[in-house]
Amino acid sequence: MPQPVTLLGLESSCDDTAAAVVRVDKHGKAVVLASVVAGQTDLHAAFGGVVPEIAARAHAEKLDLCVEQALAQADMPLGDVDAIAVTAGPGLIGGVVSGVMCAKGLSAATGKPLYGVNHLAGHALTPRLTDQVPYPYLMLLVSGGHCQFLLVSGPDDFSRLGGTIDDAPGEAFDKVARLIGLPQPGGPSIETAARSGDAKRFAFPRPLMDRDSCDMSFSGLKTAVLRTRDTLVAAQEGLSVQDQSDLAAGFQAAVVDVLAAKTRRAFEAYPQTGARSLCVAGGVAANQSVRHALEGVAAEFDAAFVAPPLNLCTDNAAMIAYAAAEQLQLRAPDDFTLSARPRWPLDTVQPSMLGSGKKGAKA
């Protein structure tokens, strides 16, 4: 970093409206001066999941307020930031549009350069934000909408080693929580219920374990939980609290086993030169069972294990500001033709895992 930079970041790709101010010194060390996240859990609770139209409207209403709060926390006027960074995709298009348009307005009003950032790059570079992890490092990006192993070799150099061919783990957590009558968001609910459950009561599958690759699948696991639930309901006309806990524990254990096994295979593709690091980011990285298992795998391969603080695992704007800070050394700012992208794979060389269409590759 040739000179210190301070960036204002905006994030609105799903159901968290966020703004942050991040300062990066000339040595690349970052300090989060302010981070504001306005969640929407209450708005979507009655629907069992995120409703895109409701999310987009909430983003439009709260983005300017989050920016105001972040600047106040940082004790910094808008004119003192060096650049404005915003998630330009992938994500729910209404929310992404809200963020991009807000960032364009701020850029136009202040004359500050504008940087559109890939939301996944924000997660993937979070270990640099928190721990200055040296390149290259192995990243497991595991969230509500994405799950992939990446070899991160630079701010814009991401090689996908494998990923999910269907549901992301976070999506599966949400769906299973709904199936067994637990509240949303599903990740925390499953984790809490699993603490008092018997993970060995039900024999749930570990999909794709027979494939010598880093690819994963969680759709069949979700279906196995559904069928087990239906069998219990038919036999006893409902689920007991212990049934819910056992189902949650068995499902979570299966996810953890798959992630751990596939991480071992990902290490086989990791360059052997120098010290190695296994990093994890995304909302599912907040799950303590997942963290503990991955930490154990890292120890097996004599690699450092880096997991960000819980508040930086889930969607936030600090990671977006930091990603822009790293990338601004490599590219020019975006102009006002910057567009919101519902799909935006990090690795644009390999073929899409989930197919593509008029809107581009999904992942």
Image (cartoon, helix red, strand yellow):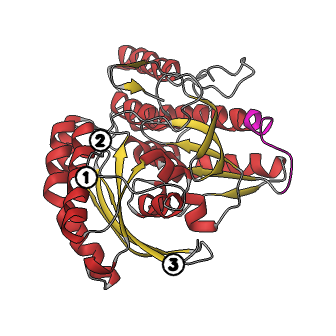
Question: What percent of the width, then of the height, locates residue 318?
Answer: 42, 64
First reached walking from the N terminus: tag 3 or tag 2: 3
- Looking at numbered disc 2 in the image, what kind of residue is underneath it? Ala
Residue drawn at (57%, 24%) of the image? 202
Q: Is residue 25 left or right of residue 339?
A: right
Q: State how far apart marks 2 and 1 are (Cα).
A: 9 Å
First reached walking from the N terminus: tag 2 or tag 1: 1
Residue 33 drawn above or below residue 278 = below
Residue 272 or 328: which is nearer the viewer?
328
Q: State how far apart marks 1 and 3 are (Cα).
A: 25 Å
The answer to which image quadrant residue 132 occupies is bottom right
Residue under pointer 2: 340
- Residue 4 is tagged as 3
**Highlighted magenta segment, given as a residue range:** 264-274
- Residue 99 is tagged as 1
First reached walking from the N terminus: tag 1 or tag 3: 3
Helix, strand or loop under label 3: loop
Disc 2 or disc 1, which is closer to the eye?
2
